[in-house]
């Protein structure tokens, strides 16, 4: 498979799903999910048919989710990412629903890097409002995805000084989660802090000592300080 082929498949699936031919659409997709197809192609397939009308597209996503395949979560992530400009709250809520349905670390990471992360990059304030609620979600994978989204944003920022206020706002977002105790969620929080520390070390070095006085998992502090210099 290559990118043009992935785009063409996405267009065929879009035509089928918009005509409510969900079985035929999944029959096109299933062989690709059964292979070790690179994520970039799966994401392109999802992005392509995800640009079509919301209602039938979302019905088809529910069909994909019933099979709980790793590649299926990537396709769903690509489709929901394509919906962010049109329906950010809805795309986030569907991502949350599928993170819970996946019930595994890679599901949270795949979807976290494709909806919360890009949401923060393109629609910072709107995404931030939604993610504040995710911090206290009863589901540990949803809480993990908050840190995954921050990691994605920090990676894309590459330390741009103009984005320093957003980096500071993301530290504020993660601050209540510094005392997160459930290990699956802790790893996501630590991942987000580690990448923020890589690109905004001075900011994280100033922020971290205030958090160390609180009860926390050592792994969170270790990851947050990974890229800080010896003096910091």
Image (cartoon, helix red, strand yellow):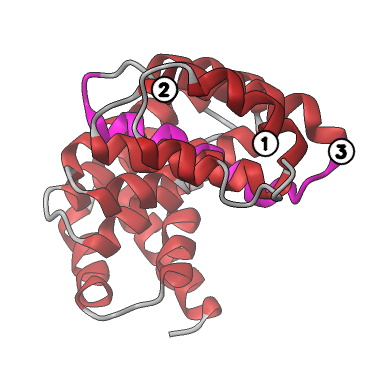
Tell me the crowding category of disc 1: few under 14, some 14 to 19, or many 20 or more residues within 10 angstroms, Cα based.
few
Residue 65 on image: x %, y %:
19, 48
Residue 100 is labelled as none
* Residue sitting nearer the eye, 47 or 170: 170
Q: Is residue 220 visible?
A: yes
Residue 97 on image: x %, y %:
26, 31
- The residue beneath circle 3 is 161
Q: Is residue 81 visible?
A: no
Tell me the crowding category of disc 2: few under 14, some 14 to 19, or many 20 or more residues within 10 angstroms, Cα based.
many
- Which residue range is magenta in the image? 138-161
Choose top left, top right, bottom left or bottom right for residue 160: top right
Task: Provide the secondary structure element on which disc 1 rests.
Answer: helix
Residue 150: in magenta span: yes
Of labels 3 and 1, earlier in sequence is 1
- The residue beneath circle 1 is 122
Residue 6 on image: x %, y %:
46, 73
């Amino acid at each position: 498979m290559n990118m043009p082929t992935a785009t063409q498949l996405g267009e065929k699936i879009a035509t089928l799903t918009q005509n409510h031919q969900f079985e035929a659409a999944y029959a096109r997709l299933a062989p690709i999910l059964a292979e070790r197809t690179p994520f970039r192609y799966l994401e392109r397939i999802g992005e392509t048919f995800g640009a079509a009308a919301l209602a039938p597209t979302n019905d088809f996503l529910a069909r994909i989710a019933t099979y709980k395949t790793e590649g299926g979560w990537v396709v769903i992530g690509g489709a929901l990412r394509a919906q962010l400009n049109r329906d950010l709250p809805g795309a986030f809520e569907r991502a949350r629903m599928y993170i819970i349905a996946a019930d595994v670390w890679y599901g949270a990471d795949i979807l976290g890097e494709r909806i919360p992360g890009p949401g923060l990059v393109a629609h910072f304030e709107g995404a931030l409002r939604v993610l504040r609620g995710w911090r206290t979600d009863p589901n540990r994978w949803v809480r993990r995805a908050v840190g995954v989204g921050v990691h994605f944003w920090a990676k894309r920022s590459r330390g741009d000084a103009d984005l320093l206020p957003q980096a500071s706002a993301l530290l504020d977002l993660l601050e209540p989660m510094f005392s997160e105790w459930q290990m699956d969620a802790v790893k996501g929080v630590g991942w987000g802090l580690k990448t923020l520390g890589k690109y905004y070390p001075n900011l994280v070095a100033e922020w971290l000592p205030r958090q160390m006085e609180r009860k926390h998992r050592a792994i969170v502090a270790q990851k947050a300080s990974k890229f800080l210099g010896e003096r910091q």
